[in-house]
Amino acid sequence: MPAQSALDLATLRADLERAAAPWRFAYTSMTALTEDRRVNRLGVPLPDDLDEEQLRLQSESAAAAARAASGDSIGAPASFDLRNAGGADYTTPVKDQGNCGSCVAFGTVATLEHVTRYSRTPALPVDLSEAQMFYCWGRADGATCSTGWFPEPALDAARDQGVTFEDYYPYTPGDQACAVNADWPNRLCRAASWQSLTSNVAGMKQYISQYGSIVACFYVYQDFFSYGGGVYRHVSGGLAGGHCVVLTGYDDAQGCWIAKNSWGPSWGEAGFFRIAYGECGIESWHTCGVPGTNLHTWLPNQLILGLWSNESDNNVWAYGALRGWLKLDGTAVPTGHAMFLELAAAKARGTQVGLFEHNGQVHQVYAW
């Protein structure tokens, strides 16, 4: 949609004071841009029949539903924050999508990264390629920096093709032909599956607390560009476009979702933000969960901390310091036993090894 005139910050300050809003505005990395460049950092196409008054009414009912689906009532915790889950931070660093409507790639890739780490260990180095997601899979689906994309086809690609690691295709903003390393099929992460959670608030909280993160899209108003902290509610300015982020938590006491954005760490709360339940369609517009991921990659520099087996010949496991428990290849018993002996020797020496993981199993070992 065409960019509107920039929101006057004095007007925003007055509107915030009048609304007693629980958030503060700030001069951010986004306010330093022109309005058209701010809008370029969105990237979810708006519905042709969008009715803003209907959206406002839906927001009220969505907020009520989110409050009713309290953690206690659905068997989930009353609050969850992936940055401090059991004392550990499972999030990956905040990134900056730059001058391109590629937010869907960043929201879906961050979700894959977070689910991967939360289901394994917080130290696992997982940095996946937003460039492949957007310039390969998105481009094949007709997505460009000016049109944006949707999370559903992005998650289809993550499930069916997978996403390689950042060093195999580093991200730069701007439309481009797919230029991924030809070896990418040997280093990737796949979504095991995905599920729509749109308008399913209980499911959103359950997925976040169980798997770590979900993808969510919402309607962005001009005041959001100036968000500096607190629990965001729209108070001023017109509709700027649609945006995709990763939800990393929620807090029933504050009545809000916690999200990681893709506008760099100098925006918001070090790149994160909190948004009130029901606000801006956050629960009711392209919301998706990933219940697990599969890795197909070398995991170098693993210190073996534990080994486990029982009377079953093909039930042998190893615990890598950066990876956690992995089953040794159970399809060939002699291979599994040979790897077990190599890993036992490495554990005894306290030396690191390399493990090649495929869908939760070790298929190769490199010991030195």
Image: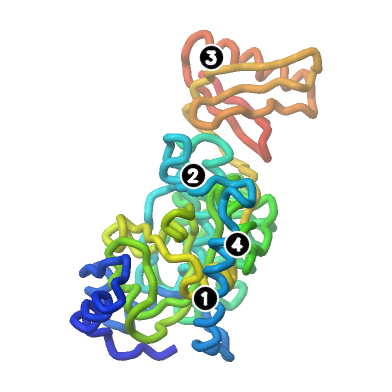
- CA separation in Å, label 3 and label 4: 47 Å
Q: Nearer the viewer, mark 1 or mark 2?
A: 1
Q: Nearer the viewer, residue 154 or 216?
A: 216
- Which circle's residue, 1 or 3, is located before the other in the chain? 1
- Which circle's residue, 3 or 4, is located before the other in the chain? 4
For label 4, the residue is 201
Q: Is residue 3 left or right of residue 61?
A: left
Q: Nearer the viewer, mark 3 or mark 4?
A: 4
Residue 21 seen in the figure: yes
Contact flag, marks 4 and 1 (Cβ < 8 Å): no
The amino acid pointed to by label 4 is Val
The amino acid pointed to by label 3 is Ala
- Which circle's residue, 4 or 1, is located before the other in the chain? 1
- CA separation in Å, label 1 and label 3: 57 Å
For the residue labelled by badge 4, is the local secondary structure a helix, a strand or a loop?
helix
For label 3, the residue is 346
